[in-house]
Image (cartoon, grey):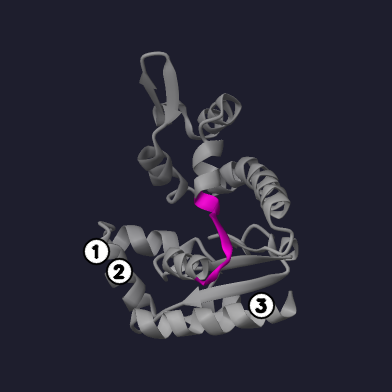
Amino acid sequence: MLTIGLTGNFGMGKTTVLRLFRRSGAFTYDVDEFVHNILKKPAIIKKAADILGEDVLTKKQANISIDKKRAADIIFHMPEKRKAIEKIIHPEVMKAVKLAESETLKRKPSAIIIFEVPLLFEAGYESDFDRIVVVHCRRNTALTRLAKKGFSKDEALRRIRTQMFITAKKKMADFVIDNNDDMKKTELQVKRIFEKIRSIG
């Protein structure tokens, strides 16, 4: 059994690569989905509102939830608030990661499990994974892809600037995937890396 952390920077193709690893036979999880579920917990909602203000709350009948767009607007403009939120979320994320590992290993003890973790290095998670894969592409390529998803250049750059430089992440990776070109080239890299990971496991 091996657990792999998959990371990169905003718009560089982590989710696409995660899907390719799944096709190759890995058990895959997107940590953003864990965060989505964590943010539904009443205790977390209360803590987030204490930091970001009541304006981030949306009330529908008896349900109270966090308006993610409003929260993101604050978080990516105010670093101190972003760090305070991360201190609440990150321990919960790692609990969810460990639970997913445990449940997967019950089903298949030899599983290779890959977690897509956008802030893997920023949160200091590198020691929680057996190997780390970093996906990268040119910044302009990432911006073009993000524009197609509806992100303005300013919004995309603001998010990218909150992350560690991709050059630093590449240096700390066990495996690096160049996602600048077409899908076939990326898929070949994924297959090659997955075979190497299988040989380690």
User: Compared to 58, does 136 lie above or below?
Assistant: below
**Element class at badge 3:** helix
* First of labels 2, 3 by sequence position: 2
Q: Position of residue 88 (x, y in %)?
A: 63, 40
In the image, 109 versus 197, the foreground residue is 109
Looking at the rendered structure, the kind of residue marked 1 is: Lys
- Residue 101 sits above or below residue 139 on the image: above
Which disc, if any, is residue 197?
3
Which residue lies at the image location 65% right of the left edge and 45% below the top edge?
96
What numbered label is drawn on residue 145?
2
Image quarter hosting the C terminus: bottom right
Image location (x, y in percent) of residue 188: 46, 84
Q: What span is in magenta? A: 24-32
As helix, strand or loop, the secondary structure at mark 2 comes to helix
Which of the marked residues, 1 or 3, is nearer the chain's N terminus?
A: 1
Q: Amino acid at mark 2?
A: Arg
Q: Name the residue type under label 3.
A: Ile
Q: Which mark is residue 148?
A: 1
Inspect this view and state whether residue 177 appears. no
* Residue 187 image point, x, y percent: 44, 79
| Residue at 39% over, 80% down | 138
Q: Position of residue 34 (x, y in %)?
A: 55, 45
